Amino acid sequence: RSPQVKAFVTQDIPLYHNLEMKHLPGADPELVLLSHRYEELERIPLSDMTREEINQLLQELGFYRKEMPDAPVPEEFQFAPAKPLPSLLLPQASTTDSKTPPKSDKGEHPDL
């Protein structure tokens, strides 16, 4: 295992809200993104990434990083990195003209 990934697992994971580590003996490390119903959305291999690259990826995905593991999470990030499902936007898209992008309610968080 990469020392970069080990450092991320031991030092960085505790700082992220809604990020959980499950150790699977013999398995290559990967980030598994789940919906709010715990349905698998995507798997991202981490073996060849540096600690900095993994942290950057999580930031880009919208995970909230706390200063300390026990720090409170602001209310607006309680459901982070939740994003609306594209399928939920389809009915709205059909009611607007094709030049106007569908509006999404940033307060809704159907996925974690």
Image: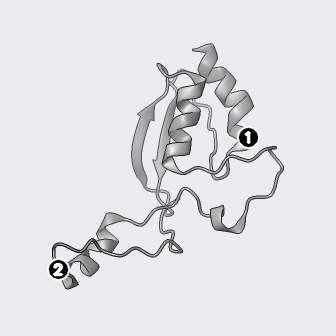
User: Residue reaching furthest left?
Assistant: 98
Q: Is disc 1 placed on a helix, strand or loop?
A: helix
Would residue 71 be found to the left or right of residue 63 on screen?
Answer: right
The part of the image, by quadrant, that contains residue 67 is top right
Q: CA distance from mark 2 to mark 1?
A: 45 Å
Image position of 37 with respect to 41: above or below: below
Residue named by callout 1: 14
- Where is residue 13? Give x, y as percent: 68, 37
Classify mark 1: residues with Cα within 10 Å, few (<14), some (14-19) or many (20+): some
Q: Position of residue 19 (x, y in %)?
A: 62, 46
Q: Is residue 75 left or right of residue 49?
A: right
Quarter of the image for residue 97 reads: bottom left
Q: Is residue 36 above or below residue 34?
A: below
Please say whether residue 1 is visible from this viewpoint: no
Please tell me whether residue 17 is drawn above or below residue 11 in the rendered image. Answer: below
Q: Which residue is mark 2?
A: 97
Q: Secondary structure at mark 2?
A: loop
Q: Do the residues under discs 2 and 1 have CB atoms within 8 angstroms?
A: no
Quadrant placement of the N terminus: top right
Q: Which residue is rendered at x = 36% and y = 76% of the image?
A: 103
Q: Amino acid at mark 2?
A: Asp
Viewer-side residue, 66 vs 33: 66
